[in-house]
Image: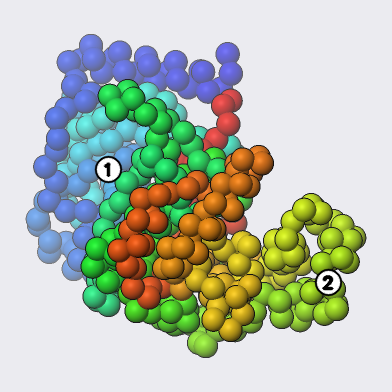
Amino acid sequence: MDESSRLIKEIKERVEKLREKGINLYPSGFKRDTTAEDIANRFGKMSHDELQNINDLFTLSGRVMSIRNFGKAAFMHIKDGTGSFQAYIRKDKIGDDNFTVFKLIDVGDHVGISGSVFRTKTDELTLLADSIVILSKSQRPLPEKYHGLIDVEVRYRQRYLDLIVNDYVKSTFVLRSRILKNIRDFFYNQGYMEVETPMMQAIPGGATARPFKTYHNTLDMDFYLRVAPELFLKRLVVGGFEKIFELNRNFRNEGISTNHNPEFTMLEFYTAYATYEDMMDITEELLTHLIKKIFNQSTIKYQDNMLDFSTPWRRISLVDSLRDIGGMPEDIISNSKTIVDFADSKGVEVENSWEIGKVLFALFEHLVEPKLIQPTFITNYPIEVSPLSRRSDKEPGIAERFELFIAGKEIANGFSELNDPDDQRDRFLKQVSLRDSGDEEALFMDSDYIRALEYGLPPTAGEGIGIDRLVMILTDSPSIRDVILFPHMRKK
């Protein structure tokens, strides 16, 4: 029998002994009047003598994290949702029967405890128990204290256990919640309205990505989990909502990596009568607002880099970045005959049939993107890789589009929206042709969206921000799985 099985067997035996004594191991609810944080705030600075004048009893509850037995007395550390506190259990204080029950309590059990506060000889603030009850009996042992839960595979598959024993993991998700709240507050204060659009779509659109497919029995039709909410959000702008945002999930049937999860959180926002340059300004304002609120400074550490969010951030065109950052010779950048050979020499897989803009984009991802450590806007993307973006009036082959990169990661994608229905129809048809030739990430034709544009989409700019990647940076997390509570995993 291995160690884990032996421990489980011993716990099961204690469970049976408690039940034989008529102890309800899973009672309904528990009334507590304070928390670990409250106790620390109220009495943390009081001396031993000052605490002797406090005669009040306090009732707390939480999970037992450690027990040190000394025969007729014991110390316990108990953790609730606000922190942890030490409790001192004495046989002569709680009585023989209750102490017998206490001896059958395990690390991992939830307990309710009442008592008074005092300081031990080592000056630790402690609750002297008058009573203790079991609120929920744990029937599996927690990982051993000094080794903890280290195995990444187990941590992700059993996040509940990860949260119990690794406080830093819990703090990551507490910070994630604060980030989301501050994002919402920012947009509410800017006059935006939060909306919700369909998760299941008859025609997936808004991004070049492979969708998940499902089927609705009653309607007798296929649906797709959305890859992006973009086309529905722009329908709302057509309908008259001039400043909107959605903070919700997207689904893409693609690979899994430290930067990719098939289900992820995206912020998308749209502003009528704005341009992609306005979106860059808003993005700077949003992220500097977040960092000031959370860290009260403009620089943060991410892995091995110090990131400086002082504005203005660098703005450079994709072509210029290939030359200045990627080291690509300028004469090759515009030469459709030699650029494929250059890509091949750099180990970048491209096809001879690709238009030059698509090749440039592939080279950018390989040569430039990993080097964009400080917040940087890359602008002026080729129209071939921007099927929903407005063309530049000065350079029709260029889209009024940008992407934001931080720490070598794409964080945001925004552009002036294409609102010419004829141009959009032509680009959809080109995407359909790519899909027919085997490109599973190409867009579908969406005739209703074209119809919406024909009613008139005002000059509009929009943007999507990958929340999980942003949270990775703000919590100094190396993998996207570290900031998603339940990341998708392969079957064991």
Q: Residue, x 56% and y 47% (percent of image)?
A: 432
Sequence order check, earlier mark of 1 and 2: 1
Colouring: rainbow
Taking 30 as reference, is 81 left or right?
Answer: right
Q: Nearer the viewer, residue 317 or 306?
A: 317
Q: Is residue 262 visible?
A: no
Count residues near mark 2 (Cα–Cα under 10 Å), then give few for <14, some for 14-19, many for 20+: few
Contact? badges 1 and 2 (CB < 8 Å): no
Q: Residue, x 17% and y 15% (percent of image)?
A: 22
Q: Position of residue 365 (x, y in %)?
A: 70, 63
Q: Residue, x 61% and y 80% (percent of image)?
A: 395
Q: Position of residue 176 (x, y in %)?
A: 40, 59
* Local secondary structure at mark 1: strand
Foreground mark, 1 or 2? Answer: 2
Q: Which residue is mark 2?
A: 335
Identified by mark 1, the residue type is Gly
Q: Position of residue 205 (x, y in %)?
A: 45, 50
Q: Which residue is mark 1?
A: 62
Q: Quadrant of the N terminus?
A: top right
* Local secondary structure at mark 2: loop
Q: Position of residue 83 (x, y in %)?
A: 32, 54
Taking 321 as reference, is 180 left or right?
Answer: left
Q: Is residue 258 visible?
A: yes
Q: CA distance from mark 1 to mark 2?
A: 68 Å
Residue 203 falls in image quadrant:
top left
Residue 131 falls in image quadrant:
top left
Q: Nearer the viewer, residue 174 or 217?
A: 217
Q: Residue, x 36% and y 50% (percent of image)?
A: 448
